Amino acid sequence: MYQASENRYDQKNIRHAGDSGLMLPAISLGLWRHYGSNDPLNQRRDVILHAFDKGIFHFDVANNYGNDGSGFGSTETLLGQILNQELKAYRNELVISTKAGYEIHDGPYGIGTSRKSLFQGIDDSLKRLQLDYVDIFYAHRFDEATPIEETVRALDDIVRQGKALYVGISNYETLQAKKAIELFKELGTPFVLDQMSMNMLNTHVADSGLKELLKDNGAGLIAYGPLAEGLLSNRYLAGIPDDFRIHRTNHDLLQAGNPALVAKLNALNTIALERDQTLSQMALAWLLQDPVVTSVIIGTTSISHLDDNLKALDHLEFSETEVTRINELLS
């Protein structure tokens, strides 16, 4: 019978989502890939429970996560089994987030953020997760086919019905987020987070003004893909294969060619080694030095990789010289 580590909160790097009372660990665990029905439940359970033992109490999923393009919903089902068994006694300590908006089933309501799609999405997610409510429910993407007023009202009603405690948006650009925030404020919706692709090589969130918008409105930013599909690790310091699968939000990173990016990665790695960190640890620390960033979502199926990433929390400060050198490399 699983019993959580008594030392799980020794790492006290816990942050508020903007001005809200919602608190998250600085590093969260996302289950986007390799946590579906095709994956070994026992091994994935070991990673999730180890993460909780290490102070990661936020687990992030979405209703379309499964087997990399199939088995939609099976990631929620896997997590639901663990929540209902090993972690049931710890539900009050956990923050569980899920999302709806990308394709989940055939037909016009299997995609998008219409009222019908979002209500079906949250109800089906709760069944798979075996929960009465989720802590955060996101509109997973901006839906041009649905009035934003309809999406915001549906999210607000989902909270009022007790199916979610807080709401967030994901993959909304600055003007889209601005409009949504205005509507959330009118309704008094507990909007707390914007989940975006963000890493030290991809500065779109800052460059677009989105980060400043969130700061001005008391909301937090939560970063997915903080290691750019593993580019910000020691794995590709000798070269990036031509068939490397990069997330659509990071395609621009390869515009100058693979050799140019490899040279940049090695230069960043030199700074990381001088800081007594791995490149991955420095990349996570770089995001977490920003107070607007509530948490970064890592994705791993390896306990050793998870522990290695958590060591980033031991050294989050950057000297003025380090900031200058890194910014010169990233410009």
Image (cartoon, helix red, strand yellow):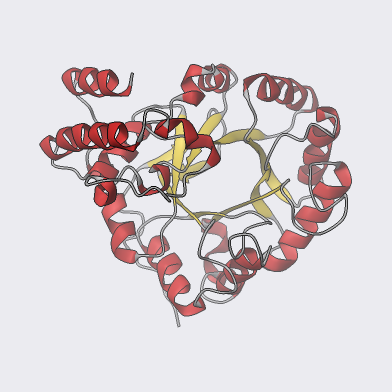
Please state which of residues 84 and 235 is positioned toward the viewer in this rendering: 235
Position of 276 with respect to 118 (left or right) is left
Image x and y of residue 110, in percent:
82, 53
Residue shown at 33%/65% (left/top)? 303
Q: Is residue 316 visible?
A: no
Image x and y of residue 39, in percent:
52, 73
Does 21 sit above or below residue 137?
A: above
Quadrant for residue 65, please give it: bottom right
Does 192 sit above or below residue 234?
A: above
Quadrant for residue 269, please give it: top left
Which image quadrant: the N terminus?
A: bottom left
Residue shown at 43%/68% (left/top)? 49
Image x and y of residue 293, in percent:
45, 32
How many numbered badges does the structure rendering display?
0
Position of 191 with respect to 265 (left or right) is right
Residue shown at 45%/40% (left/top)? 295
Which image quadrant: the C terminus?
A: top left
Position of 171 with respect to 93 (left or right) is right
Task: List the single residue furthest toward the bottom.
Answer: 1
Does 28 sit above or below residue 31?
A: above
Please state which of residues 60 and 278 is positioned toward the viewer in this rendering: 278
Q: Is residue 183 visible?
A: yes
Quadrant for residue 15, please give it: top left
Does 275 sit above or below residue 104?
A: above
Residue shown at 35%/49% (left/top)? 241
Image x and y of residue 309, in percent:
31, 51
